[in-house]
Image (cartoon, rainbow, N blue to C red):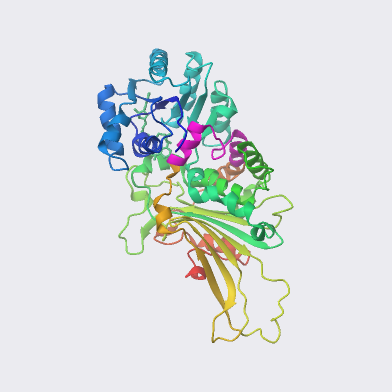
Amino acid sequence: MAQEQRLIFIIFGGSGDLAHRKLYPALFKLYVKGYLRQHFAVIGTARRQWSHEYFRQTVMESVVADIGDQEQIASFAQHFYYQSHDVNDAEHYIALKKLSAQLNDQYSAGNNQVFYMAVAPKFFGTVASHINSEHLLNEQGFNRLVIEKPFGRDLASAKALNDSISKTFAEDQIYRIDHYLGKEMVQALPIIRFTNPLLAAVWNNQYISNVQITLSETLGVGERAGYYETAGTLRDMIQNHALQILGLIAMDRPAEFTASAIHDQKSKLFSQLQLYSAEQVDQNFVRGQYGPDAKEYQQGYREADNVADDSNTETFVAGKILIDNDTWQGVPFYVRSGKRLRRKATRVDIVFKPEANNIFATKLAKIVRPRPVVLSLVIEPKQGIQLLLNATTPGNGLRTTLDELRFQPPAASLADSQEAYEKLLIDIVEGNQTNFTNWSEQYYTWRFIDRIRKRWDEVQPDFPNYCSNTFGPEASDQLLKKDSHEWIFGTDYLE
Ligand code: NAD
C-alpha cells in the first residue's frame, strides 16, 4: 500500500478543462491507492461563484466514469473546497491563505502545500507573485509549485516567466509539467538504455546511423484551434515533448538515477544541440500545414473554426537535429510531428549502420542482402519494443529476410498501466522531480527552437502543403533522402 501523504492541494483554474478531465480523475486514483487518505484537502479556485457543494458535484461527475464505487467517490469529494478567485485581486489570495490554514488544521495536513497552475499561461507569473506578496507560503512543511505547459513561447518569455516564479519558489520547489514525461514507456527509456549492456555498448555514432523520433496524430486541431493559432507544432510539440524524448535517448549515462543527475545530463545534452543559421534552418527543418484529404472528406486547417483563412500556423514539423559531442558526432536525429497524419504514434526508431565488413559481399551478394537493423521503442499507441534483424527463413537457403522480434506487455499488465497525470501527481506529492523539466533544460531547448522560429517568421510559407491522411509534405521525405536515409515509420520499411 502506498504511503499516505499529508497536504493541501490548491488548484488555480479549478473549474477548467484540465482540472476536470485530468487532475480530478488522477487525484481520485491517488485516493483509491492510498497516497491520499485522511490528511488532505483540495481547494479549487476559479472566477465563478460556486458553493463547496456545487464544486464537489462537478468533481464527482469528472471521476464517475473511472475506478471506485459511488461511496468512495463521495467521500473523496468531501475533501474538496471552493474559493472564488480573480488572479489579480490581492484580497482573494488573503482569503485563500485563511482557507488553506484552516484546512491544514482540520486535516492535520503537515503545513504542506501544492500550488497547481491550471490557468492560462499569461496568469502564471501573476499568481506566483501574489503567492509571494500575500505570504501564502508556509514556513514549516513543503511548498511546491506545479506549472502547466507551455513554459513560455520563446526564450525571452520563458526567461521572464522563470524570473517571476523564481522570486517566490526555489528550483527544487518547481515542477514544470511535460506530460510526455509521465508516460510509462518514456519513463522506461533510461531502464532500457542503462540496464541492457548489449544496447549500452552500441549506443553511439560507431554503430548508430540515425535516430527518428515521430509524434504523429491523426486528429486535426478540433476545438483547440484558438490556442493552436498562437502556438503551432514547433512550440506545441517539438520544443518540449520531442526534445525531451531526444534528451532521454541521447543523454550520457548519469552517475546515479536521481532527479538532479538526470537533469544535469539532459541539460548538458541540450546545450550541445547544434544551433542553426537561417540557411541551415532552411536546409534542416521543414514545416507544413494540412489541407483537406484527397477525397475532401475532411476539411483543411484553414477551414477550421477560429482559424484565419490565410493562417500560416504550422501543423507539421520535420527536422534534422545534430548534437555536438563525441558520442553523436555525425548522427542525425530526425524529429517529426504533425496533425492529421495517416497514423497515430509516438515512437523512436533507431537505425543501425550496416556491418562494415560484409563477408557476403562478393559471392553471395545477390541473395544475402542485409538491410539496416532497426530498434523501435514504441511509446504509443501500444507500448513495446521491436527489433528488426537480418535473418533467414527455413527453406530459403541463405536468402536474407528482415525478421521482427517484438515485445509487447501482456494485456493484463496493460490494464494496470498508469495514466501520465496519475504518475506525475504521485511524483508531486512524494517530492520527486525526475519526470519534470528544470530551468536549464527549458533554456537550452528554447535557445535551439528560437533560431528556427525566427527564420520561419521571416519567410512566408506556401501553405497548405500536405493532404490530410498522409505523412506530411514531400519535403519531409526529401529531408532524409538527401542523407540517403528514409523514414522507418509510415513507409514500406515496416509494412
Ligand atoms: P480552461 O480555459 O478550461 O480553464 C481555465 C481556468 O482558469 C478556469 O477554471 C477559469 O475559471 C480560470 N480563470 C480564467 N481567468 C481567470 C482569472 N482572471 N482569475 C482566476 N481564474 C481564472 O483551460 P484548461 O484547458 O483547463 O488549461 C489550463 C492550463 O493547462 C493552461 O495553461 C493550458 O495551457 C494547460 N494545459 C491544458 C491542457 C488540456 O488538456 N486542457 C493540456 C495541456 C496543458
> The N terminus appears in which quarter of the rendering?
top left
Residue 380 visible in image:
yes
- Compared with 78, 249 (above or below) is below
On the image, the x and y values in percent for residue 237 come to 49, 46
Does the magenta segment cover residue 30? no
In which quadrant of the rendered view does residue 478 lie?
A: bottom right
Please report the bounds of the magenta region as a residue range.
422-447
On the image, the x and y values in percent for residue 154 come to 55, 37
In which quadrant of the rendered view does residue 88 lie?
A: top left
Q: Is residue 102 left or right of residue 493?
A: left
Name the quarter showing ligand 1. top left
Q: How many marks?
A: 0
Q: Give the residue displayed 52% in from the left and 23% down from the top.
A: 142
Q: Give the residue displayed 73% in from the left and 74% down from the top.
A: 357
Does the magenta segment cover residue 439? yes
On the image, the x and y values in percent for residue 145 come to 50, 27
Residue 150 visible in image:
no
On the image, the x and y values in percent for residue 474 come to 50, 62
Q: Residue furthest front?
A: 1
